[in-house]
Amino acid sequence: MDDALAELADAAGVATAYRDGAGRRVDVSPDVVVAVLGQLDLDAGTPAAVRRSLAEVRARRRRTVAVPAGEEYPVPDGTLRAEDGGERRVTGALPATTPPGWYTLAHRGGETTVLVTPDALPPVPDVWGLAVQAYALHSAGSWGMGDYADLREVVAYGAELGAGALLCNPLCAPDLVPPVPASPYSPTSRRFANPLYLRVTETPEYRRADEATRAKVDALRPDTGELIDYDAVWAAKRAALELLWPLAPRGPVPEPALAGYATFCALADRHGADHRRWPAPLRRPGPAATAAAGPDRVGFHAWLQHRCADQLAAVREAAAPMPVGLLSDLPVGVAAGGADAWAYQDVLAGAVSVGAPPDAFSTAGQDWGLPPWRPDRLDATGYAAYRETLAAACALGGGLRVDHVAGLFRLWWIPPGAPATDGTYVRYDADVLLGALTLAAHRYRVAVVGEDLGTVEPEVTEALRQRHMLGCEVLWFARDDAGSLLPTTAWPRDAVASISTHDLPTAAGFLTGDATRVRARLGLVSPDEAARTEAERDELLTVLRAERLLSVGGETSEAIVALHALLARTPCRIRLAALTDVLGETRAPNLPGTTTGYPNWRIPLPLSVAELRADTRLPRIAALLRTR
């Protein structure tokens, strides 16, 4: 690669080479580097353009800095303004006594955003917990999928069994225009809640409705099928909520963030879920969009969020006895045409998609279809959009699981129209991104779990450890450098331990071989990989017998109990039991690499919430996990 292009790429944080999962160096094509630089508004098409762009990058002044609390930090003379508006003069250095928080420093050269971050969070207590896909729950009161009331009941039951945490899939707002996306990891907004989870019959409006209106609402309830039909669920709930909307109190105009989200939803009802295809005057927030949305429709969608907040508050109350509580999940990004992308389009690389480079798990790489933050625009705006996203996520309380936490350090950018193989990494200011996360978690008193599975640089794991943020350890991946299963004593202390994840085979699917057979049917596994999986299963069963946790010839159900007993022997701070594993479900919630042929995110649990309470398997496993 040309030296000047490489210099520009390095200055802009665009990788020209990287190490793959096997540690091998991979050189990035110059064409890919040029394409990614173009998405940062840096022309690299000619030598002269490269020189101009390099001069531009070098002339930029850093506008946001992160400072550890308790350290004196050199700054220009100026006026330091705190978030509450208080001001003071600083000369030469930020005092070491400056409390954690966000500040604006006005000085002769302009303004600099200063983040003073706590050194670390309090250590997470030793607990066991449950992992739940909320949509997969069902009960006599829910409508075709799990809802906030079902989740509240499972949280309460977990607390009765002594669980200290409950990890739930993202509850973020999806596109509400059919076809409603099933994946909870591609939300329209990470700042607002999912109305599909509303228990319609627990709203104040339903309770105050007359008998005839309640009868109309009740008649809309869809049945629970073999698979979840999100379109049918939302059609029924939308119709029911429209019947109840006239009974809702008409309050003041929503605060700006909620008003913006509700405006987007109102416009999406009319023009579709992708704002990039709307009439030109509506593609950006502003007076034209507000006028076109209409106050009634904006009010309706704001009301839905208020009712979501009410029912989520009841979930939090049920989790109050737990030392950690509800661990909500923060997806790595948002839908490219959705509400947050509409609101934050000036700080997102809207034409780019993030994903992962080729590896042993996915030889074609992965394209997640989510636009990334632009690091330069985040810096220039004081990370305001990121701060708002974190505040909304942490406000749920308990804990926060950050999906693909390595993305706070670098993300795999795929240029427009390119396959996932033709991308490269773009670097972020991890000190600011992690510092902002630490501050938000400190303020809201939440634990933080960083999903650090897959190809993760050692600096990521070390940065989490220093801040008392937990990583993840999964039984299927817990192996030493020689490929042998790690003894439980060697598992990391600062981690969340689990048998599997939502993207991996369930315990029963792995033990019975069903997971491999499904992947083989879909052409996702080679004969060599199938043989390796079978060998790994035999190795695991051998370990369980050697540990005296499983007898020879033990049934799959006994092997599942034994796997949780093995998990209980790890030193990890949180040990999770997934309901899919406890109940012997062979199908994983999601099968990466598939969009058709497998019912991703649409599989209900085999038991209802009431049946779960009557089943003996969870109490038995709970007794194992709460005993150290």
Image (cartoon, helix red, strand yellow):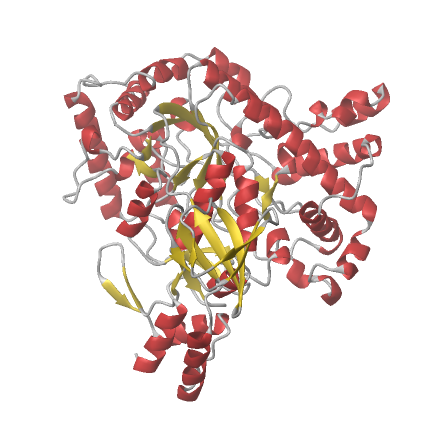
- Quarter of the image with the C terminus is top left
Please state the horizontal and vertical placement of residue 618, each as a whole percent of the image. 41, 17
* Residue ID at (48%, 74%): 38
Please state the horizontal and vertical placement of residue 140, each as a whole percent of the image. 62, 19
Residue 207 in which image quadrant: top right
- Quarter of the image with the N terminus is bottom left
Asked if residue 549 is positioned above or below residue 63 in the image, the reply reads above
* Residue ID at (27%, 58%): 20
User: In the depicted view, which residue is nearer to us: 465 or 92?
Assistant: 92
Q: Can residue 154 be seen in this view?
A: no
User: In the depicted view, which residue is nearer to us: 546 or 281?
Assistant: 281
Please state the horizontal and vertical placement of residue 2, each as a whole percent of the image. 31, 82
Q: Can residue 194 be seen in this view?
A: yes
Is residue 276 left or right of 124 when viewed as pictured? right
Residue reaching furthest to the bottom:
48
User: In the depicted view, which residue is nearer to us: 383 or 280?
Assistant: 383
Asked if residue 175 is positioned above or below residue 553 in the image, the reply reads below
* Residue ID at (78%, 26%): 205
